[in-house]
Image (cartoon, rainbow, N blue to C red):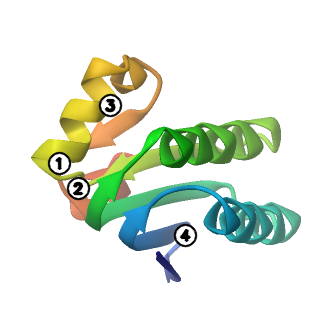
Amino acid sequence: MNIITKESGNITIIELKGNVLGGPDASALNDILHQLTGKKKKNIVVDLSGVQSMNSSGLTMLIGALTTIRNAGGEMKIAAPSKKIESILVITKLATVFEIHPTLRKAISSFT
């Protein structure tokens, strides 16, 4: 998995690409989130448009990311999951935990 961070005004976009399987990727994402919260960056969008597959460890990684951001007083939203990833979020009932938007643009605009 590749992790790319971008800025759009006061919103940080974390773009995930490839397979989200947890493990070392979870540590890398956690490190990025702690750096962002240390810089008072609290509006986060996780762009899943480039994610092909995700396992339970990947889901746990997203839950951990949400917890980290919320504990810092921020908010995290999910953007552009594929139909496959979205169905996983629905089946696991995580669609009720995460705020999910069909596109990156809609996720970004939801902060205003």
Residue that badge 3 annotates: 89
Whether residue 112 can be seen here: no
Where on the picture, by quarter, is residue 104?
A: bottom left
Horizontal relation, residue 46 to residue 68: left or right: left
Q: CA distance from mark 3 to mark 4?
A: 22 Å
Residue extending farthest to the right is 38
Residue that badge 2 annotates: 80
Circles 1 and 4, Cβ within 8 Å, touching? The answer is no
Nearer the observer, 104 or 29: 29
Residue that badge 1 annotates: 102
Q: Which mark is residue 12?
A: 4
Circles 2 and 3, Cβ within 8 Å, touching? The answer is no
Horizontal relation, residue 22 to residue 1: left or right: right
Of the residues tagged 2 and 3, which is closer to the observer? 3
Q: Residue type at mark 3?
A: Leu
Mark closest to the chain's N terminus, 3 or 1: 3
The residue depicted at 49 percent of the width and 40 percent of the height is 59
| Mark 3: secondary structure | helix
Of the residues tagged 2 and 4, which is closer to the observer? 2
Mark closest to the chain's N terminus, 2 or 3: 2
Mark closest to the chain's N terminus, 1 or 4: 4
The residue depicted at 71 percent of the width and 71 percent of the height is 28
Circles 1 and 2, Cβ within 8 Å, touching? The answer is yes
Mark closest to the chain's N terminus, 3 or 4: 4
Q: CA distance from mark 3 to mark 1?
A: 13 Å
Query: Quick one: label 2, few (<14), some, or many (20+) residues within 10 Å?
Result: many
Q: Residue type at mark 2?
A: Ala
Circles 3 and 4, Cβ within 8 Å, touching? The answer is no
x then y, percent, for residue 110 = 35, 46
The residue depicted at 55 percent of the width and 57 percent of the height is 44
Mark closest to the chain's N terminus, 2 or 4: 4
Q: Residue type at mark 4?
A: Thr
